[in-house]
Image (cartoon, grey):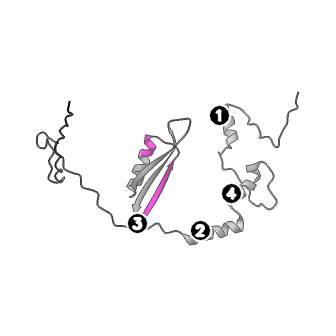
Amino acid sequence: MATRKKKRPPPRKAAPPAATRRTPRAGKRPGAARTAIPAAPVRPAGPLQYKVVELSTVDEGTLERTVNEWSARGWTLDGVQFAMRESSKRPAMAFVFFTREGEPAAQDVEGARSRLRQMSETGSPTAQLVASPDFTGNAATSSSSYQYQRPPGMVSAHERLAQLAGLDEPERPERGLILEPEE
């Protein structure tokens, strides 16, 4: 018995250009043939400024407030990046990126230099704070002339935890390492 060859369909014609092609249901129902949305205008090449806002509390409200606040200041939302925890599906942090055209803000070079000169002469405020007896619980070094004074109504983290725990008198932090005898 002889094998028969299968007939192949004729080759298809090339599709007409997109401008002349009509959708099959155009004009038959409302909204069937929608007009194309024009592409965004190409902006001239110029310097872009970037703004990054870090959010440690990530929820609908903080994201909405941040986008609305910076959009009102002339920034355009560029994107949002979430930082996730391994133990949770909720993001731990969010970084919201904004851009805008224009020259970057001028830097106050002279002001920065004067602050550096002042810190070199008097020491940094952080170093002075750490050297104070109220901060560390230890006697300040003799070279430190800075005396830290706690603002009225301010309590240390240890004292606040003691208040929250309902303790009347907060325990003083222990100094040094105390070893218990082995039994």
Q: CA distance from mark 4 to mark 1?
A: 28 Å
Question: In the picture provided, is 4 more to the left or to the right than 58?
Answer: left
Assess whether mark 3 and mark 4 are in contact (beta carbons under 8 angstroms).
Answer: no
Q: Please rate how many residues cluster around mark 2, counting C-alpha atoms within 10 Å: few if below 14, some from 14 to 19, many from 20.
A: few
Circle 4 or circle 3, nearest the eye = 3
Q: In the image, residue 15 lies at what x, y percent?
A: 18, 50
The residue shown at (79%, 55%) is 140
Q: CA distance from mark 1 to mark 2?
A: 42 Å
- Quadrant in which the N terminus appears: top left
Q: Quadrant of residue 122?
A: bottom right
* Camera-side mark, 3 or 2: 3
51 within the magenta span? yes
Question: Rounded to the nearest whole Å, what is the CA distance between mark 3 and mark 2?
Answer: 23 Å
Q: State the residue at coordinates (65%, 34%).
A: 164
User: Label 1 is placed on what type of residue?
Assistant: Leu
Label 4 and label 2: CA atoms lie apart by 17 Å
Look at mark 4 in the image and give the residue it sits on: 126
Q: Amino acid at mark 4?
A: Thr
Q: Nearer the viewer, mark 1 or mark 2?
A: 2
Mark 4 or mark 1, whichever is nearer to me = 4
Q: Earlier in the sequence, mark 4 or mark 3?
A: 3
Amino acid identity at mark 3: Gly
- Span of residues in magenta: 47-63
Q: Quadrant of the C terminus?
A: top right
Element under label 1? helix
Name above or below for residue 160 compared with residue 51.
above
Q: Tell me the SS state at disc 3.
A: loop
Residue appearing at x 71%, y 55% in the figure:
129
